[in-house]
Each structure stands twice: as C-alpha cells, then as structure tokens.
C-alpha cells in the first residue's frame, strides 16, 4: 500500500513538472517578446514611372553607378547541376557573386563553410561577406541555387533607398509572432543591416548558433530572430501596384495558379512586370528564363528605360 501511495505521489509530481514546462514554453517569445507583437508589418514599394521621370538625368547617372550588389549563393554538392546553371546565367549580372558550399567541391570554385547546417552556412557566409566587402558593396543578396534573380530589377526596386538604413527585404512570411523574409524568394540586406547582424553573431543570447530552443527552426527564421534584436524588421517588397516582386514559385507555377484562380486576368493575376526573383527552377528552366529575360527582343521595338545599369567591368554579362 505504501509503495502504491509513493508511486502515486511521484506521478503527481512528474505531471505537475510537465504541465509547468508546457506552460513556460507557451509563454516563450522569440526575440524581444511583446515588442514583436506590436510591430506593424511593412510593405515597401518601388518608385513608379512618374517618380522616376522627376529625377534629373545627372542624378539618374549617379544612382545607376552607386548600386553595387554582392550575391551570396548557398550550395551543397547535390546541387551541382543547379550550381552550374546559376553560374552560367543570372549571377553574371551581380556586381560580384560567390558560392558558399557545405564542403569542398572540386568541380566549381566556392568558399567552403565546412558544415551541412544551413543556418551555420548562412551565418558564416554573411560574416565572410561583411568582413571582406563591407567597403565595396552596399547591398547583399542571398539566394538558393533554385532561385533565378533579375538583378537589374532589384537595383530598380532599391532606387532612392538609403543602404545606410537597416533594410531587410524580400517576400515576408508570418509565423506566430515572428515576421521573416522567406529564403525561397531571396533575402536582401543593406550594409547597415549587415553591420548590425555582424555585431550580434558573437552574442549567443541574442543570435545563437543553434537557435537556443528545444526545437530547431529554419535558417530564415533564425536570421529574423537575430535581426530583431538589432532593431531590423522584415519588409515585403512590392511594385508600385502592390504586387510582390520576390516570388517563391516558378513562372510556370505562378501562371498555372493564375489560370485557376484568375482565368480572366491571367497575366495581371500572375506576376509583377518588375519581378526580382522566381524560385523552384530546374537547370533547364534557368536557361529558358535567361533567354526570355535577356536575349529575346522584338525587332524594331526600342526600349526607353530611364535607367541603365551597366554590367560589372570584365564580366561575361549577357
């Protein structure tokens, strides 16, 4: 009888401890707790055509020269075919592009991160980029090898946006109290955001290497947690009409969805004319996108764009 009573008391105690643990976890907030709850979601839009035309020709020329985008592509050996396609296509339009791999790969030149953990790869890549290039580039674009980016459209979107301010841009996603930029569409940080992030990388309480929680969260969420401690918040990038410019799906899938949900407005319901990224592409689709975006032209049709972003010196820009 005494033994049964003892077992019962042990069960009650263990149950109480378990309930207390669940209650405590339920009150955990990522980052600054209630401060996040009151933060309003930001929608950041590109300039419209009328705003562009108001900029003087001299200022346009100066702006077009001042934008320098450094591209970070995180890769693993299994991505070798995508890696090759990205290297041969859109990354030529970055002012500089470098590949950061989980391990040494003989086939392509890359910077070895010596880890298979995507969050550690991201941290190391950002630190490497900041330490080496902080005085050379003012915008940093990070992407997966399944992403196709139109860098000229990115530069157009960033017009009149001051890189000395803490920008953190892309396709935003809300998860509980956390708003973050999803990695599927690519992530853009200004040099100021890079500076703030770098200052936190060695502070485990604010930017832990392993998340500091019982369960593991994705690398893009981890980044948002760290940036919130630095006062940097996710902003959704949109064109002048309010359409997303960082797309987490391919053009084909976006058109298919538009045909299903907006059959009378397939083009309008699909994508922005100034789209910056598409995701989920195969190597062949990368080359098709390159053809459609940069090579196909209507004979006799003259483009009168207000801005011209020249390719980097010595590049093999298409």
Image (tube, rainbow, N blue to C red):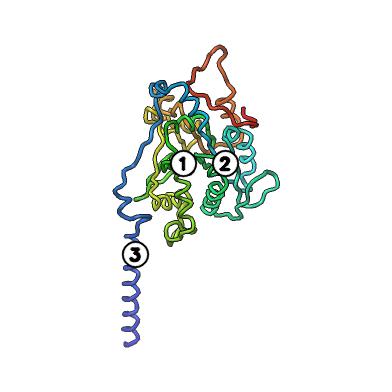
Q: Position of residue 280 (x, y in %)?
A: 53, 38
Residue underneath mark 2: 145
Q: Position of residue 64 (x, y in %)?
A: 50, 28
Please tell me whether residue 261 is drawn above or below residue 182 in the rendered image: above
Q: Answer with left or right where residue 84 lies relative to residue 203.
A: right
Which residue shows up at 35% across the image and 69% down it?
Answer: 18
Q: Position of residue 67 (x, y in %)?
A: 51, 33
User: Is residue 285 something one can see in this rendering?
Assistant: no
Residue underneath mark 3: 22
Residues at marks 2 and 1 touching, judged by CB atoms closer than 8 Å: no
Please tell me whether residue 303 is drawn above or below residue 31 in the rendered image: above
Numbered badge on residue 190: 1
Q: Position of residue 232 (x, y in %)?
A: 40, 47
* Mark-to-mark CA distance, 3 and 1: 39 Å
Mark 3, secondary structure of its residue: helix
Looking at the image, which is closer to me, 6 or 285? Answer: 285
Of mark 2 and mark 3, the one earlier in the sequence is: 3
Please tell me whether residue 134 is drawn above or below residue 90 in the rendered image: below
Which residue shows up at 41% across the image and 36% down it?
Answer: 237
Which residue shows up at 37% across the image and 27% down it?
Answer: 241
Q: Quadrant of the C terminus?
A: top right
Marks counted in the figure total 3
Q: Answer with left or right where residue 273 lies relative to residue 105.
A: left
Q: Answer with left or right where residue 209 lies relative to residue 172.
A: right
Q: Answer with left or right where residue 284 lies relative to residue 41.
A: right
* Mark-to-mark CA distance, 2 and 1: 21 Å
Q: Quadrant of the N terminus?
A: bottom left
Tell me if mark 3 has few (under 14), some (14-19) or many (20+) residues whose alpha carbon lies within 10 angstroms of its own: few
Tell me if mark 2 has few (under 14), some (14-19) or many (20+) residues whose alpha carbon lies within 10 angstroms of its own: many
* Mark-to-mark CA distance, 2 and 3: 39 Å
Nearer the camera: disc 3 or disc 1: 1
């Amino acid at each position: 009888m005494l033994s049964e009573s003892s077992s019962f008391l042990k069960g009650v105690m263990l149950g109480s401890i378990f309930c207390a643990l669940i209650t405590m976890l339920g009150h955990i907030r990522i980052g600054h707790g209630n401060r996040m709850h009151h933060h309003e979601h930001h929608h950041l839009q590109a300039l419209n055509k009328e705003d562009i035309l108001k900029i003087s020709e001299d200022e346009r020329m100066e702006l077009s020269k001042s934008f320098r985008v450094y591209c970070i592509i995180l890769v693993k050996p299994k991505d070798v075919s995508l890696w090759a396609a990205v290297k041969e296509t859109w990354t030529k339009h970055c002012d500089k592009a470098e590949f950061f791999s989980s391990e040494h790969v003989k086939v392509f030149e890359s910077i070895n991160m010596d880890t298979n953990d995507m969050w550690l790869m991201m941290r190391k890549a950002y630190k490497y980029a900041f330490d080496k290039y902080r005085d050379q580039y003012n915008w940093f674009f990070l992407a997966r090898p399944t992403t196709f980016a139109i860098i000229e459209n990115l530069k157009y979107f960033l017009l009149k946006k001051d890189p000395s301010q803490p920008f953190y841009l892309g396709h935003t996603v809300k998860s509980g109290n956390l708003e973050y930029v999803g990695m599927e569409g690519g992530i853009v940080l200004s040099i100021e955001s890079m500076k703030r992030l770098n200052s936190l990388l060695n502070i485990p309480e604010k930017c832990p290497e392993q998340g500091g929680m019982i369960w593991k969260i994705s690398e893009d969420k981890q980044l948002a947690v760290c940036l919130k401690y630095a006062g940097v918040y996710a902003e959704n990038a949109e064109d002048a009409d309010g359409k997303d410019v960082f797309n987490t799906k391919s053009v084909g899938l976006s058109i298919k969805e538009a045909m299903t949900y907006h059959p009378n407005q397939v083009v309008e319901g699909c994508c922005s004319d100034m789209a910056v990224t598409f995701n989920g592409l195969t190597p062949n689709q990368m080359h098709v996108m390159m053809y459609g975006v940069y090579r196909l032209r209507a004979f006799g049709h003259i483009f009168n764009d207000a801005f011209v972003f020249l390719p980097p010196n010595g590049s093999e820009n298409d």
